[in-house]
Image (cartoon, rainbow, N blue to C red):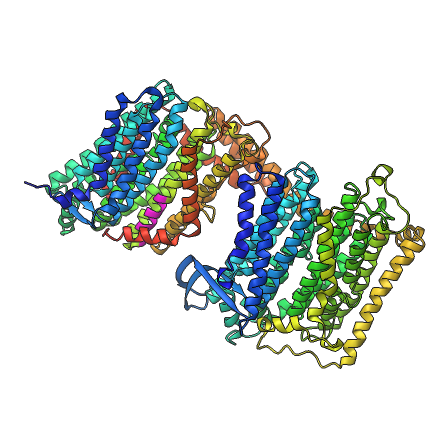
């Protein structure tokens, strides 16, 4: 079983290849059979591998398939000789096992859901081809045993994300959103790449185990500047992929993609890749407390910030998008305080309930023939009961109501951010307030969508129908997981044994002390009580405002005035980025393209060539001085190609002369220089 | 007086088989009715396969043959295999092309085989006269092939230019050989190397002879300033012929360049090295920058072929500077990788250009990504590989050449090469952008690919990804193959 672990990523890849080559020609049923069946087999194989791993005493399995980049000997930054040989290999340890199960399991469920959801959309095979390609990339990302191969998966999921966000490419906003996601992610990817290069010259390897071993060997001091730089660069990479401040702007726009995509890529799996990467590099981060503080700070800030925006959004998916950003913030907070296991735990439970929320939201949208504005919903509770109940379960889970999964994992993070070795009261307060906001915006959504009087457009009203069975099956399965998911990490305090945490321990066992600050069990219980209390408060406030007295909502909004405006407009961050970066780049691009055209035109006339060249040069100078940021390279490139065109007369005689000239030059040179 | 022995014959078995099949094709041609000419294409292909299998039948027979004029060693085997592969791909890609354009004459197949024989002799010979004969056999066949669309003025122009300038350049090569013979009394490369290794043997005239031979070969591989014929000839020749022309004869001439320059020029001091260095820098730069402005796909790829010759020269310069096999093996790797992507690209363009090759402007490919997604995707892979994007053969080809040149201390040349490959991305991706992102109806042919062409394209794609994802096998092969070199 384990020996053939490569089948797990390979099967979805085969599915993608099938869709690419034959998808257009075969029937829809064949498309779904292949593209849902193969990830299904992959999931089954992953379960088999998981149990095989449990059977191994050390819970570790590595498999090298073949040598990939035999770079050979080179000098490390320390002056020693390194020998870099990157191979294609798989590492299955508790961390990657959890990720593998989440990706294949939730992935499979979402594939099943998509059969119903995408049934009436064009490009059915294309959708499933991309989805399978995504599964392949994501599994390469989590199963690889080195940074470089992980990066290949990292880029692969980025590409699939781009393709799937822009899936409805005939919609301008969708293709724009795809581009935005791609470009913003590039910033993070560049940092990741730099971090990886630093790892190569520092450790001479990119293998996870080798790097971890070196970092834990005690050879590198805590606060080592190189390692801190590596960690910060890796974290910037994670910021891009996992949509944290300041690179989160792409995720809300990514909701332009089909809803199963939002569930799979932009909630459950891809966006958590950053958390996985930071956890994977935990040995490095433990040596860089400054980077850890940055991770925790950004995480907590993002959690709070995104939650405040979520309260004012009216698009059902956008609320969930900001909620995802906020929850990812929690995970990074956990990583930043050294509680990597808690971060991964929340990653897992979040995958369940957030995928469920998206799929249920998709079911709502499906029922309302594509309507996404919550102001045009309401009173749907009786009409689509299964969707309602599963939505409610997910909302309770994310709000942190015991004993659902979200409660257990979020509370673990809150406790660790308070009592953990790198914890701080400020982090806890931020997380605690966010928990209240989370409950508020979730139940605002529930009440606006499912309760109260119907505000649905009349022509949509009579089309409302519960979704097909394949979609409901996915919802119910995920609802079940959201309920019971917490029990595998049930805390000791409440009579559990935190089995997930202990399972993950070997991955996060660092020589640096990670003992909790010395607080009594009573304190943990108090905090737990407080977090449940604020969650209930949030729900109650939402109930008061949106069910009991809906007219209050507007009044509240008005009384907050400018504050509400700022939140509604997402703190104007998009506008700020447009003004600061996007428009600048556009201007430079426009200047350069106008310039290109001028130069090209100028070159057509061979007679006036020299004169025009002078003119071009002076114009170049003018533009350069005035604009200060013209793309000189493009001009230079075009300029260089003129002489070649002038020589290329097409006349054999002149060609022969040129050859003679060449002979003379070379011979002259060679004879003179000896 | 030399005698012909059985082992000697075994050492040129592939060439003999190829020549035999070529003659067979010519003999059968009158008996095959006009509509059935493709049978002869299959016979020619069979000849290539049998020639390839000759290696496995014959006992291990490395060594010199025919009084030292044939060097059957790993180096020549590598190239013979490469030529056979190129010939097979070109044959596969030609069959339907010839039928489509009503120029289905079996001489085509015979000429391809004869040209391959000539190339094999070029790579496998350690004797200048033999090399010259190989060069002529190969060139004369390709002159005819370039003009094979004989009712098309562009093709005639191409053949005429290629013939005139080719003969002109070959004369330089022959002139160089004559000088060498006059000065040293031998034309055998092994004897020559031994002779020139003695102190004081290098004179002004021997240097001049070396340059003259370089010019003859530089013409074939189209390095600046001897590249001038390339765009006109590549554009006018039938596209499958261009596929063959831009890879086979080029690789053969490189094989000779490597043999001569690594074998002889070593003792001649750094000046010969600088000739290669300057040629490399000029060739890359001129090729890439001229390609930027091209509006015709074939012409753009012709300039790209020039640029690639420059990269290979970087590898040769590295080999000359360091004396290790790393440079030579990088050259071999590059030539093979380049062969797959270039043959694939030209064969595909031959198909897409439609009847009479009427559609070869870049603008004809607008929107092809939607109209013919399969072909567009394949062409995209070829372009990505040519520009050296990772996970394709082109990446590792460049990577090994650049690595060798860095290890040889040629930092300046490496920087020029890297900058050049950045420039090249622009025009390769331009085609991709045209196919996928420009709005419009493509003029290029949308007929499905015929099966023989399909298999040639699939084989090229497989090779590109195989070399790009798993380069080690092949690197080992090219390293072993360059061992026989000094």
Above or below, A393 against A533 in this view is above
Q: Nearer the viewer, residue A349 or A514?
A: A349
Question: Residue B132 lies in what quarter of the image?
Answer: top left
- Segment tinted magenta in the rendering: B326-336
Q: Is residue A159 visible?
A: no
Q: Is residue A94 left or right of residue A463?
A: left
Q: Nearer the viewer, residue A38 or B233?
A: A38
Which secondary structure dominates the residues rendered in magenta? helix
Q: Nearer the viewer, residue B231 or A143?
A: A143
Residue B327 covered by magenta stretch: yes
Q: Residue at 53% of width from left, 27% of height from top?
A: A601
Q: Residue at 32% of width from left, 36% of height from top?
A: B87
Q: Position of residue B254 (x, y in %)?
A: 29, 41
Q: Position of residue B225 (x, y in %)?
A: 33, 35
Quadrant position of the N terminus of chain B in the picture:
top left
Q: Is residue B75 left or right of residue B436?
A: left
Q: Position of residue A157 (x, y in %)?
A: 59, 51
Question: Residue A290 lies in what quarter of the image?
Answer: bottom right
Residue A160 covered by magenta stretch: no
């Amino acid at each position: 079983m384990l020996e053939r672990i490569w089948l797990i990523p390979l099967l979805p890849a085969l599915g993608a290849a099938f869709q690419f080559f034959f998808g257009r020609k075969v029937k829809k049923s064949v498309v779904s059979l292949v593209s849902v069946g193969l990830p299904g087999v992959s999931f089954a194989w992953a379960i088999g591998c998981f149990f095989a791993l449990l059977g191994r005493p050390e819970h570790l399995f590595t498999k090298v398939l073949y040598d990939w980049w035999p770079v050979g000997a080179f000098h490390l930054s320390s002056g020693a000789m390194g020998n870099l040989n990157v191979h294609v290999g798989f590492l299955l340890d508790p961390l990657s096992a959890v990720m593998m199960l989440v990706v294949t399991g939730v992935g499979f469920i979402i594939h099943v859901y998509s059969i119903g959801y995408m049934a009436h959309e064009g490009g059915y095979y294309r959708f499933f081809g991309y989805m399978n390609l995504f599964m392949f990339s994501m599994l390469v990302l989590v199963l690889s045993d080195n940074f470089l191969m992980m990066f290949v998966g990292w880029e692969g999921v980025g590409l699939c994300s781009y393709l799937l966000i822009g899936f409805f490419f005939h919609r301008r906003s969708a293709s724009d959103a795809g581009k935005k996601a791609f470009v913003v992610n590039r910033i993070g990817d560049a940092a990741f790449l730099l971090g990886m290069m630093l790892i190569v010259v520092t450790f001479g390897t990119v293998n996870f185990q080798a790097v971890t071993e070196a970092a834990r060997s005690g050879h590198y001091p805590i606060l080592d500047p190189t390692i801190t730089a590596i960690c910060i660069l890796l974290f910037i990479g994670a910021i891009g992929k996992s949509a944290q401040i300041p690179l989160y702007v792409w995720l809300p726009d990514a909701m332009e993609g089909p809803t199963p995509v939002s569930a799979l890529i932009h909630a459950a799996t891809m966006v958590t890749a950053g958390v996985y990467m930071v956890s994977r590099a935990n040995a490095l981060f433990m040596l860089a407390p400054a980077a850890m503080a940055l991770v925790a700070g950004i995480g907590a800030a993002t959690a709070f910030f995104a939650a405040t925006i979520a309260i004012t959004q009216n698009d059902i998916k956008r609320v969930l998008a900001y909620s995802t950003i906020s929850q990812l913030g929690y995970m990074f907070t956990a990583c930043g305080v050294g509680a990597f296991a808690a971060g991964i735990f929340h990653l897992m439970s979040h995958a369940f309930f957030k995928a469920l929320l998206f799929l249920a939201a998709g079911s709502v949208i499906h029922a309302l023939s594509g309507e996404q504005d919550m102001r045009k919903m309401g009173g749907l509770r009786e009409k689509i009961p299964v969707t309602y109940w599963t939505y409610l379960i997910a909302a309770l889970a994310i709000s942190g109501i015991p004993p659902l999964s979200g409660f257990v994992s979020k509370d673990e993070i809150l406790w660790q951010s308070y009592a953990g070795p790198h914890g701080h009261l400020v982090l806890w307060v931020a997380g605690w307030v966010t928990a209240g906001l989370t409950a508020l915006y979730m139940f605002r959504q529930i009440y606006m969508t499912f309760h109260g009087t119907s505000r649905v457009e009349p022509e949509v009203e009579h089309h409302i129908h519960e979704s097909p069975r394949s979609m409901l099956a996915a919802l119910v399965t995920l609802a079940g997981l959201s309920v019971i998911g917490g029990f595998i990490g049930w805390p000791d305090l409440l009579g559990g044994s935190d089995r997930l945490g202990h399972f993950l321990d070997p991955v996060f066992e660092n020589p640096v002390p990670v003992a909790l600050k010395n607080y009594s069990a009573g304190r943990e219980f108090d905090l737990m009580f407080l977090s449940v209390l604020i969650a209930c408060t949030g729900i109650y406030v939402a109930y008061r405002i949106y069910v009991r007295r809906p007219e209050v909502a507007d009044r509240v909004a008005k009384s907050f005035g400018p504050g509400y405006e700022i939140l509604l407009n997402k703190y104007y961050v998009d506008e700020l980025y447009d003004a600061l970066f996007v428009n600048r780049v556009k201007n430079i691009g426009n200047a350069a393209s106008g310039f290109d055209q001028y130069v090209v035109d100028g070159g057509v006339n061979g007679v006036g060539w020299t004169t025009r060249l002078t003119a071009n040069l002076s114009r170049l100078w003018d533009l350069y001085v005035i604009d200060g940021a013209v793309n000189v390279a493009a001009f230079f490139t075009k300029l260089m190609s003129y002489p070649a065109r002038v020589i290329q007369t097409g006349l054999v005689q002149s060609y022969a002369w040129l050859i003679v000239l060449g002979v003379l030059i070379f011979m002259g040179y060679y004879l003179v220089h000896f | 007086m030399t005698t012909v022995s059985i082992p000697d014959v075994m050492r040129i078995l592939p060439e003999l088989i190829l020549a035999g099949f070529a003659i067979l094709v010519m003999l059968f041609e009158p008996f095959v009715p006009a509509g059935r000419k493709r049978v002869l294409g299959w016979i020619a292909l069979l000849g290539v396969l049998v020639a390839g299998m000759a290696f496995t039948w014959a006992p291990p027979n490395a060594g010199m043959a025919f009084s030292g004029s044939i060097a059957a060693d790993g180096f020549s085997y590598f190239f013979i295999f490469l030529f056979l592969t190129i010939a097979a791909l070109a044959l596969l890609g030609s069959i339907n092309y010839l039928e489509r354009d009503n120029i289905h004459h079996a001489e085509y197949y015979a000429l391809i085989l004869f040209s391959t024989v000539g190339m094999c002799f070029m790579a496998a010979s350690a004797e200048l006269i033999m090399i010259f004969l190989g060069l002529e056999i190969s060139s004369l066949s390709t002159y005819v092939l370039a003009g094979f669309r004989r009712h098309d003025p562009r093709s005639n122009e191409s053949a005429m230019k290629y013939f005139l300038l080719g003969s002109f350049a070959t004369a330089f090569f022959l002139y160089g050989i004559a000088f060498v013979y006059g000065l040293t009394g031998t034309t055998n490369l092994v004897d020559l190397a031994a002779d020139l290794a003695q102190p004081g043997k290098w004179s002004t005239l021997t240097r001049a002879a070396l340059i003259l031979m370089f010019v003859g070969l530089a013409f074939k591989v189209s390095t600046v300033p001897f590249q001038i014929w390339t765009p006109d000839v590549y554009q006018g020749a039938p596209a499958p012929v261009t596929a063959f022309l831009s890879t086979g004869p080029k690789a053969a001439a490189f094989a000779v360049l490597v043999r001569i320059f690594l074998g002889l020029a070593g003792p001649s001091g750094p000046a010969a090295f600088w000739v290669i260095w300057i040629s490399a820098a000029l060739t890359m730069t001129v090729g890439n920058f001229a390609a930027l402005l091209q509006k015709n796909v074939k012409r753009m790829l012709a300039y790209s072929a020039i640029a690639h010759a420059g990269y290979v020269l970087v590898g040769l310069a590295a080999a000359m500077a360091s004396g290790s096999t790393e440079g030579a093996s990088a050259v071999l790797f590059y030539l093979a990788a380049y062969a797959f992507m270039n043959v694939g690209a030209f064969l595909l363009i031959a198909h897409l250009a439609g009847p009479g090759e009427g559609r070869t402007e870049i603008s004809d490919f607008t929107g092809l990504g939607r109209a013919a997604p399969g072909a567009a995707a394949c062409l995209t892979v070829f372009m990505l590989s040519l520009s050296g994007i990772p996970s394709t053969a082109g990446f590792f080809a460049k990577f090994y050449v650049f690595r060798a040149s860095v290890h040889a201390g040629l930092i300046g040349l490496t920087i020029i090469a890297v900058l050049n490959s950045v420039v090249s991305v622009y025009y390769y991706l331009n085609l991709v952008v045209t196919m996928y992102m420009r709005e419009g109806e493509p003029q290029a042919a949308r007929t499905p690919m015929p099966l023989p062409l399909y298999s040639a394209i699939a084989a090229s794609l497989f090779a590109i990804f195989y070399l790009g994802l798993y380069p080690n096998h092949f690197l080992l092969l090219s390293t072993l193959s360059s061992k026989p070199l000094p």
